[in-house]
Amino acid sequence: MNNLPDSAGETIQFNCNQCNQTIGVPTASAGKRAKCPHCESIVAIPASAAPPTAPQPPPTVAPAAVSTPAVATGVETETSKLYDAIRCEVGKVFVGQEELVEGTLIAIFSGGHVLIESVPGLGKTLFIRVIGKILGCDFGRIQFTADLMPSDITGAPIFNMKTSEFDFRPGPVFTQLLLADEINRSPAKTHAALLEIMQEKRVTVDGTTHQLELPFLVMATQNPLESEGTYSLPEAQLDRFMFKLIADYPSEEQEAKILAMHGGQSNLDHTLENEIQTLTNPEQINRLTRENSAIRVDPLLIDYINKIVRLTRRWPQFYMGASPRAGISLMQGIRTLAAFNGRDFAVPDDVVHIAKSILRHRVILTAEAEVEGQQIDTLLDELIRTIEVPRLK
């Protein structure tokens, strides 16, 4: 884009941390967040003007066609500052996948879980390790296979020869950020082992209950169902996930940046230790999560959410609609999203922004719709457009 005039401090020029293109915004936007007009990622605007790190090529469009980023409304709060700082820190080693980053952070600060559908090799393990380092939380990973047993997840009693008693040995689920990789490669009995853990945040073995440390996030990944050796997750478990996010291949520019960033022989542990800062801790996350529950949701907005969820049960192309838990997840999600944007109230745009991610795994297509090749996201877009958006006072 064109370099905007910087005379008398009228604009701030900086580089997008995702596509490295130069952005110019008014100085009144200093310290806020904006959407990059080139790659559409959300970037934090610096507090003062800074020269671009490298000269940018001349624009290929007329000046009248150049658009400036739309600055999010709201004021800076503890939550919004932390969110901006986390996004900037993640951008140091993780490129793109904006929906994944935003959805995961919303889930963490809402007490929810995330299901990700993608092919291997898109950096999901790197992302959850980076998030764990930034948030100061423990990280764990389980590789799901066809022979994985429930006790391999929860842990099991081990006989102690010295005391002649059974001691409980915790499994990998005793962490705070758990990556359940390729979850749909295991049979149903192993999936069932996660149900109580995800919902109740506790593990029961041999009649003894063990509480998990909060925050606790399960970030499960699944291969597309057409892949060999995969199982369909049961509806009861799908409903436990707050979001289903789709991670797709990066753009050409993003992939080139990934190659430049990670194509060397650098050690990832060294990078996480020396380049990524820990910005918060579990205590602060739990406190902000509790405070987010005070975000105002207008009764008209509650009715709007209720209509969307209930309409999924009557939509002709859906064999099964969303449960009341979907509406609860929407309520929790828009409160957290409003807090990230520095607002103490939610708006209809918040609902539209995350509705598909919350609903797409909770509805099932009819047989006719599947044969016709209907897409759930397209149908959800049509459904949401049929409902009148409330005008909040």
Image (tube, rainbow, N blue to C red):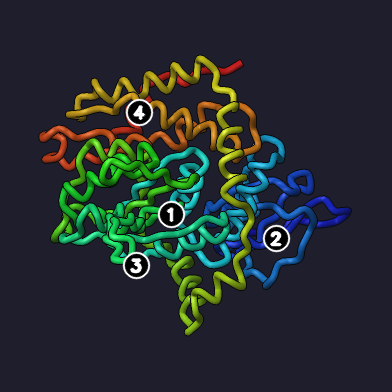
Q: Distance of mark 3 from mark 4, alpha carbons?
A: 32 Å
Closer to the N terminus: mark 2 or mark 4? 2
| Mark 3 Cα shell of 10 Å, populated few (<14), some (14-19), many (≥20) | few
Closer to the N terminus: mark 4 or mark 1? 1
Element at badge 3? loop
Q: Which numbered circle lies on residue 121? A: 3
- Please identify the quarter of the rendering in which residue 328 is found: top left
For the question of whether residue 6 can be seen, the reply is yes
* Mark in front: 2 vs 4: 4
Closer to the N terminus: mark 3 or mark 1? 3
Closer to the N terminus: mark 3 or mark 4? 3
Element at badge 4? helix
* Mark in front: 1 vs 2: 1
Q: Position of residue 118 (x, y in %)?
A: 31, 57
Tell me: 294 left or right of 307: right
Q: Position of residue 357 (x, y in %)?
A: 38, 40
Q: Which residue is mark 1?
A: 175
Q: Which numbered circle lies on residue 14? A: 2
Figure quadrant of the C terminus? top right
For the question of whether residue 60 can be seen, the reply is no
The amino acid type, in three-letter code, at marker 2 is: Phe
